[in-house]
Image: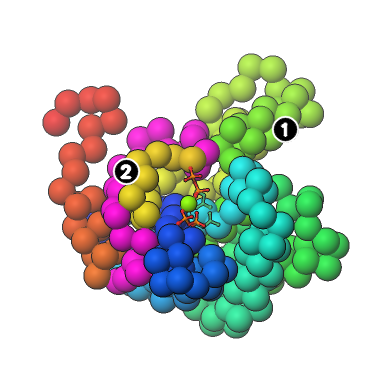
Amino acid sequence: MGGLKHVAFIMDGNGRWATAKGEPRLNGHKEGAKAMENLVPYAFSRGATVLSFYAFSTENWSRPKGEVNGILSLLMLLLKRNFKFLMENDIKLMVSGDLSPLSESRKRRITDAIEKTKDNTKTVNILFNYGGKSDILHAFKGLVEKGITNPTERDFEAELYTKELPPVDLLIRTGGEKRLSNFMLWQSAYTELYFTDVLWPDFTKSDLDEAICWFEGRSRRYGGIK
Ligand code: IPE
Ligand code: IPE
Ligand code: MG
């Protein structure tokens, strides 16, 4: 489908989904993980080649320890549960963000999966301990380290966590809020923004169809005229 290469998701509303059912917030995150697994093959089948998922922001550390640890464990479980699927479906794992707060063994498991899937052609990009501002600062430091004092946009992009990825075409935020919450700031300069009240664990293939249909109706002018 024309023009839709990179779809990104701000997977919001897990906590409210659980609370509305009288369940602990972590159950919402577990259900959210299932929604994500369910959507990946379908989103690729609709023509996307890169899928980005905002899984944990640099600000999410401010949540209660139990919830933070629960989310981290869940992400590791997701990786374990899906590694074979990634390999068998030609999907490269990418993780954008700062992995340094993780234990050595968790870091190793992640870098190992990244290495083993690196020659695959489609991409699932997980934003973990990610912030748009921290990404820009990280890129700036990379340029300084390389001694590049008069960078082009390409030089700058090469230092971002998302380096080789194309810009985001369609960003979908579930959960009703109309904000970016420190999602990819540089990479979404010309992104089409889609907001829905559906809570992430309830977001289905047909909701994705609706978002893609909306996207296809947009006129992308990039500052020019049609
Ligand atoms: C999004 O769901 C998942 C993460 C931020 C990790 P939330 O946990 O923010 O759910 P709500 O917004 O509280 O409902
Ligand atoms: C955005 O959701 C971050 C992720 C989905 C990982 P938040 O729930 O953290 O965002 P705010 O606090 O509503 O802005
Ligand atoms: Mg939220």
The reply, left or right, for residue 7 in relation to residue 224 is right
**Amino acid on which disc 1 is placed:** Gly
Q: Which residue, given by chain and number where applicable, does mark 1 sit on? A: 142
Q: Is residue 139 above or below residue 218?
A: above
Q: Is mark 1 within 8 Å of ligand 2?
A: no
The N terminus: image quadrant: bottom left
Main secondary structure of the magenta stretch: loop
* Residue 35 coordinates in the image, percent (x, y): 42, 72
Residue contact at pointers 2 and 1, CB within 8 angstroms: no
Q: Which residues are magenta?
A: 182-205
Q: Is residue 58 visible?
A: yes
Q: Is residue 189 above or below residue 103?
A: above
Q: Is residue 118 visible?
A: no
- Relative to the observer, which residue lies in front, 19 or 4? 19
Asked if residue 6 lies in the magenta stretch, the reply is no
Location of residue 12 by image quarter:
bottom left
Location of residue 112 by image quarter:
bottom right
> Spatial distance from mark 2 to mark 1, Cα to Cα?
29 Å
- Relative to the observer, which residue lies in front, 168 or 164? 168
Q: Which residue, given by chain and number where applicable, does mark 2 sit on? A: 193
Tag 2: Cα neighbours inside 10 Å, few (<14), some, or many (≥20)? some
Q: Residue at x 66, y 67 (%)?
A: 70
* Residue 196 coordinates in the image, percent (x, y): 29, 53
Name of the residue lying farthest toward the right: 104
Q: Is residue 84 above or below residue 145?
A: below
